[in-house]
Image (spheres, rainbow, N blue to C red):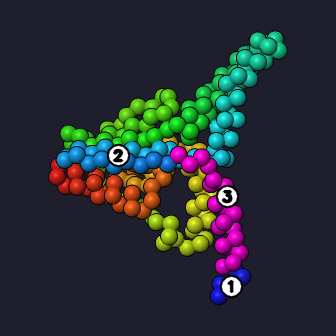
Amino acid sequence: MPNIKDKLLGIQYQYTRLFNLGLNRKKFECVPNGDKLFAMNTSKNTFLTLFFTLFSCGLLFTGFIEGFVNKAEITTGFVIVFSIHFLIGLIGLRHFLWLINGRQELTIEKGNLTLSNKGTFLTRPKTYALDQITNIWLVTDEDSLSILDKIIQNIALNRKILFRQSIGQILFSYKGETIRVFSDLNKTERTELMNEIEKRKLNK
């Protein structure tokens, strides 16, 4: 029988899972076609990150309200605060759109792997030479983690979702940098995609 410590950890684990509830918009595609590959994965969100980014979007309008509605005096300090608020609001809007509408697309063609983030603004595709990609690996499967590690992972998840567009279910090394791919895949989907990438790398 589980001891008191294990029971308390189990309760805490279930509690931390509540903070990771969000809109369920998961979709995954993996379409191999000879030496080509197309894969797509929708963004992940939580209600906490949606609330935080939506709240920050309001900073887009605070300067206009103060300057043009409340007739605040336009001083150097006002311009500085307005600019900072507007920038934070723009970043918040960009990420809010990603959380509710974003998707990451992976394409392998002509010896290159291209990652594209779509569904928001100020993004651009990134291309990696397939023969320079090394050390492709999967994130640790949650089932193999201890209950304490699961709790730590759940606590960290909101931070990752808030600051990254891709959490990184599959990772690879490229010129000394760790590249993170996709956000909400189960073990079967992660293994399938990694195998398809490795096939094309071997055939390069």
Disc 1/disc 3 C-alpha distance (Å): 24 Å
For residue 5, say whether it is visible: yes
Mark 1 Cα-neighbour bin, 10 Å: few <14, some 14–19, many ≥20? few
Question: Front-most of 54 and 112?
Answer: 54
What amino acid type should be assigned to the residue bearing mark 1?
Asn
Magenta stretch: helix, strand or loop mostly: helix
Disc 2/disc 3 C-alpha distance (Å): 30 Å
Dot 1 corresponds to which residue?
A: 3
Res 77 → quadrant? top right
Query: What number is the disc on residue 39?
Result: 2
Element at label 2? strand
> Percent x, y for residue 70?
83, 15
Q: Residue at x 53, y 46 (%)?
A: 25
Q: On the picture, is 58 further left or further right than 35?
A: right
Mark 3 Cα-neighbour bin, 10 Å: few <14, some 14–19, many ≥20? few
Question: Front-most of 7 and 76?
Answer: 7
Dot 3 corresponds to which residue?
A: 18
> Percent x, y for residue 167?
49, 50
Element at label 1? loop
